[in-house]
Amino acid sequence: MILVDERTRVLVQGITGNEATFHTQRCIEYGTQVVAGVTPGKGGMTWQGLIPVFDSVEEARRNTGANTSLVFVPARYASDAIMEAADASISLVVCITELIPTLDEVMWHRYLEGRDIAVVGPNCPGLISPPAHCKVGIMPGHIHTPGNVGVVSRSGTLTYEVVGQLTAQGLGQSTCLGIGGDPLPGTDFVQALRLFEGDPSTHAVVLVGEIGGALEQEAAEYIRGGMSKPVVAFVAGASAPPGRRMGHAGAIVSGASGTAAQKKVALSAAGAVVVDSPAEIGATTRRVLAEHGLL
């Protein structure tokens, strides 16, 4: 498993908000162990009559053994929430919050340097391990099925599209990870690919990139030198005009390296099987698995 498994014990920061309440319930229904909530000033109450709420992450971890935080805190406070989780020795933070100012993201990146903590997001759907029945995020659990294909994507909605196609092809997933669309993700493609490479339950990986930045080129370099497992890749935004932002802050072409064409060239040259349409991902993944004797 990657980052989440049967041992994952989740606390939800901002649990009393409407969005957090909805998605926390979906996580519990999927099988995730949600053991605590954190909302300053509301410590001592019980969420939905099921989950104890604490004033701080440290108090929640100490009383429940939580090791993972799911963050629904509003953007102006989200960076503080991530740093608070780090101070409380939480090992994994999944931050759903979008529209966090870039300077705030720089701040928590610097604050976490040298600490033993992984951050997924912000501005992401989270991650899910169907074999472990563990979902820490907002993705629809019912489209996922246990299997051996890893998925990593900058786009939330395309993550769901890929998973839907894989499931329709009879291809289950090991772990599906949405790294988020911000320019400074906590976990990038290379880190995710390295985890998939070392995960015996993952036999192949689907990578979904998009315009903007150079994360896909960095992924290509890792695939070229360190990836033994087949990778199927798609890059969204091929028709985007240069200089126009698409969707979120990371998806803006500011130079030749940020274009979909350059990203596709780099991934293909590194050995990934690149598709031109998202509609081809499921069938192509099945073909690649068959060609490698992995079906």
Image: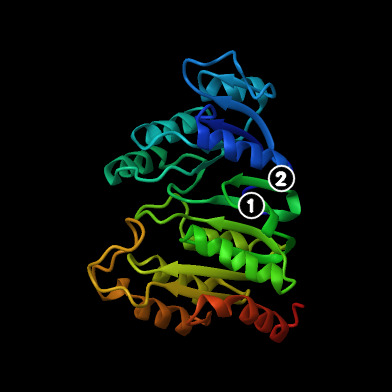
Location of the N terminus by quadrant is bottom right
Q: Residue 112: x percent and y percent?
A: 42, 39
| Amino acid type, residue under disc 2 in the picture | Tyr
Q: Residue 92: x percent and y percent?
A: 55, 41
Q: Residue at x 53, y 26 (%)?
A: 16
Q: Nearer the viewer, residue 123 or 86?
A: 123
Residue contact between numbered discs 2 and 1, judged by CB atoms under 8 Å: yes
Q: Residue at x 54, y 38 (%)?
A: 70
Q: Nearer the viewer, residue 147 or 138?
A: 138
User: Quick check: 68 above or below 242?
Assistant: above
User: Quick check: 33 above or below 221?
Assistant: above
Q: Residue 184: x percent and y percent?
A: 36, 52
In the structure shown, which secondary structural element does the residue marked by tag 2 occupy? helix
Quarter of the figure with residue 79: top left
Q: Residue at x 52, y 82 (%)?
A: 271
| Amino acid type, residue under disc 1 in the picture | Ile
Location of the C terminus by quadrant is bottom right
Density class for disc 1 (Cα within 10 Å; few <14, some 14-19, many ≥20) is many
Instruction: Count the numbered circles shown.
Output: 2
Q: Nearer the viewer, residue 293 or 173?
A: 173
Residue of label 1: 128
Residue of label 2: 30
Quarter of the figure with residue 32: top right
Q: Residue at x 22, y 68 (%)?
A: 243
Q: Residue furthest top?
A: 44
- N-term mark: 2 or 1: 2
In the structure shown, which secondary structural element does the residue marked by tag 1 occupy? strand
